[in-house]
Amino acid sequence: MSVYKKFLGQTMVYGISTILSRLFNFILTPIYTTVFAPGVYGVFTKMFSYVSIINPILAFGMETTFFRYLNKHEDKKEEVYNNSFIVIAFLSTLFLITALVFSDFLAKYTLNGNISGFADQKSYIHLFAWILFVDAISVIPFAKLRADGKPFRYSVIKFTNIGTFIGLNLVFIFVIPFLIKNGILDEWLNSWYKGRWVGYVFVANLIASLVTLLMLLPQFAALRLKFNKQLFYNMFG
């Protein structure tokens, strides 16, 4: 019974963090639709729709494979962890380099040939390439936290990510315009701040992902970049 209760408790922790993440995104939606013009908000929804497609591809099903194989071979926990991470890191790095090198083409393609807004679109491509890369390489360290039975640390990192993202959204959308309007650091802020630029939502996302990455450093430190080819074949066998 104690094992069952422990499993149930951990599942609730993992589930709550996911639910809250989606809830807060839902809460932010009215803010976005109020602040950003319909055309601008369309850019936001389009970019995040691309993310929902690319994210699972970069993960390559390695999180599921990690747990499935780990349940069968707990004695090879570290090797499974290393292999899973190396596969995702390789795919993510390849994706990142490709996205950055071909960012001009991708910007034009996502704009359907319309060159107006090209500079901004290219910036969005760069931001999302890094967001996807950072999020992808964090997948297996997060899985390791779950495998090691550390739901509290898992939830703290998830909640920190959510809090950072929401906080920075509020700063970029409301706090900075308020400071400028009231002449507080207005000269410096006006030198770089672009009013109602949807890119700040993506900047907030990237910073939140980087904060998450930093909090996962202990899990990254446990990695040994030693690839076991035979184990890789067995994991997908």
Image (cartoon, helix red, strand yellow):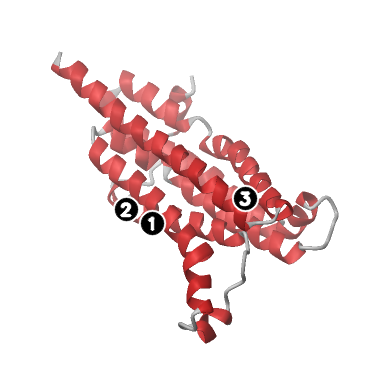
Please report contact status of discs 1 and 2: CB closer than 8 Å, yes or no. Answer: yes
The 10 Å Cα crowd at callout 1, few under 14, some 14 to 19, many 20 or more, is: some
Closest to the observer: 229 or 208?
208
Q: CA distance from mark 3 to mark 1?
A: 27 Å
Closest to the observer: 6 or 220?
6
Most extreme residue toward the front is 182
Closest to the observer: 162 or 130?
162
**The label number, if any, that marks residue 211 in the structure image:** 1
Q: Is residue 22 left or right of residue 106?
A: left
**Image quadrant of residue 19?**
top left
**The label number, if any, that marks residue 43 in the structure image:** none
Q: Which residue is mark 2?
A: 215
**Which residue lies at the image location 47% right of the left edge and 60% below the top edge?**
170
Q: Is residue 82 visible?
A: no
> Label 2 sits on what residue type?
Met
**Image quadrant of residue 97?**
bottom right
**Which residue lies at the image location 69% right of the left edge and 56% below the top edge?**
37
**Image quadrant of residue 122?**
bottom right
Could you tell which of marks 2 and 3 lies nearer the N-terminus? 3
Q: Which residue is mark 3?
A: 33
> Label 3 sits on what residue type?
Thr
Mark 2 vs mark 3: give the one in front.
3
In percent of width and height, residue 9 lies at 23, 26
Most extreme residue toward the right is 113
Element under disc 3? helix
Element under disc 1? helix
> Label 1 sits on what residue type?
Val
